[in-house]
Image (cartoon, rainbow, N blue to C red):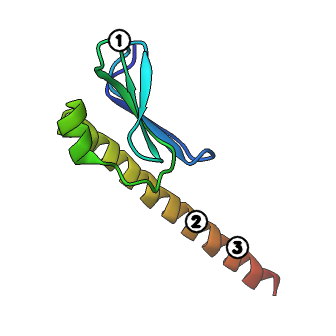
Amino acid sequence: MSTLPAVSIDYEADAAYLTLTSKAVARTCKLTDDVLVDLDEFDMVVGVELLSLAALLPVDQLITEFHVPSERLELFRETRRASVIGNLQSAFEGATKSRDEKLQAA
């Protein structure tokens, strides 16, 4: 049994999805070029998709127009922030390892 809300991040696709409910998606609204909102048959938000991890999340619009609770969006922001920090750390560690290997070979 999954716990909702949940955030999924696909680093290869550079995308993320915030699942708010397990309801079926009836339609999708394009909020911005990089943000899609999935709605159920009653126009309640099922999930929010970021087509780019660098995309700005229109928090005010999601809260006022789609009635997404701010604490659920905070989960999205925290997860994204952690993923960016993790990616930076991995990149730094990879660069450091590569540098150390080159120094040992020299």
* Front residue of 36 and 94: 36
Q: Residues within 10 Å of mark 1 (few under 14, many from 20)?
A: few
Q: Quadrant of residue 36?
A: top left
Give the mark nearer the N terminus: 2 vs 3. Answer: 2
Residue corresponding to mark 1: 41
* Front residue of 72 and 105: 72
Q: Is residue 71 visible?
A: no
Give the mark nearer the N terminus: 1 vs 3. Answer: 1
Q: Residue most toward the right?
A: 105
Between the C-alphas of marks 1 and 3, the distance is 52 Å
Q: Residue at x 76, y 80 (%)?
A: 102
The location of residue 23, given as percent across then percent down, is 37, 13
- Label ID, residue 98: 3
Foreground label between 1 and 2: 1
Indicate whether 77 appears above or below 100.
Answer: above
Q: Quadrant of residue 95?
A: bottom right
Indicate whether 77 appears above or below 41.
Answer: below
Residue corresponding to mark 2: 91
Mark 2 residue element: helix
Q: Residue at x 50, y 64 (%)?
A: 89
Between the C-alphas of marks 2 and 3, the distance is 10 Å
* Front residue of 94 and 87: 87
The amino acid type, in three-letter code, at marker 1 is Glu
The amino acid type, in three-letter code, at marker 3 is Ser
Mark 1 residue element: loop
